[in-house]
Image: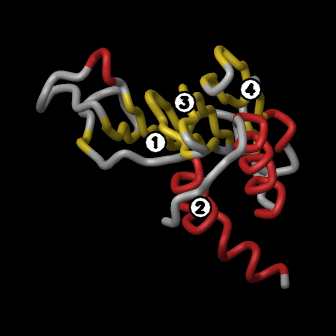
Amino acid sequence: MPILLFRDLADYQAHLKNLVAVSQTSNDWTAIKRVQKHRNAGTLFAKPFLRFNDGAIMYFNEEVILEQNRLERIEYSYHYERFDTDGHSQFYFRYDRDPQAAKPVVHEECHLHVNQKEPRFKTHATSFEEVFEFIVAGYYQDRKMRSH
């Protein structure tokens, strides 16, 4: 994935909104919010969540710092969830970066949950862009191709 540069956190927020809007998988891009903590630091999140056109949802929260136009994700959680026809949770996965709770092997700093809180699977550091693109490719690509 190429290194993306941003002028400020508002520029990064606009980038995330655009990514969601052009995907045509959700009309809920306005749910992406930003809380500025300092000039170049803050939190980006979905309030209450990002809803996909098929009813699936994505919660996310990123603690970020922008230094020399490069974004660093200090801590994050990206949670995608699908529901059955009765509205019950059918499947979820969540990527977390949790440096405060990190303990080798049992609670890796970067980890993945699938359908349950434990076990936590060790994974690489990721980003909203990477997780969102995975969701679109894995759950919506066939639907988009069939509609054209």
Which amino acid lies under the numbered mark 4 shown in the image of this protein?
Answer: Arg
* Disc 2 to disc 4: CB gap under 8 Å: no
- Circle 3 crowding by C-alpha within 10 Å: few under 14, some 14–19, many from 20: many
Query: Picture quarter containing residue 135?
Result: bottom right
Relative side of 74 to 24, left or right: left
Chain-order first, disc 1 or disc 2? 1
Relative side of 7 to 131, left or right: right
Chain-order first, disc 1 or disc 3? 3
> Up-down: is 134 above or below 8?
below
Foreground pick, 91 / 15: 15
- Circle 4 crowding by C-alpha within 10 Å: few under 14, some 14–19, many from 20: some
Chain-order first, disc 2 or disc 3? 3
What is the distance, in whole Å, between disc 4 and disc 3 at their CAs?
13 Å
Chain-order first, disc 2 or disc 4? 4
Foreground pick, 63 / 50: 63
- Residue pointed to by mark 1: 93
Residue at the (64%, 39%) spot, across then down? 58
What is the distance, in whole Å, between disc 1 and disc 3 at their CAs?
25 Å
Residue at the (72%, 19%) spot, across then down? 35
The numbered disc on residue 28 is none
Q: In the structure shown, which secondary structural element does the residue marked by tag 2 occupy?
A: helix
- Residue pointed to by mark 4: 34
The numbered disc on residue 133 is 2
Which amino acid lies under the numbered mark 1 shown in the image of this protein?
Answer: Phe
What is the distance, in whole Å, between disc 2 and disc 3 at their CAs?
22 Å
Q: Position of residue 59 (x, y in %)?
A: 62, 32
> Up-down: is 79 above or below 137?
above
Q: In the structure shown, which secondary structural element does the residue marked by tag 3 occupy?
A: strand
Which amino acid lies under the numbered mark 3 shown in the image of this protein?
Answer: Ile
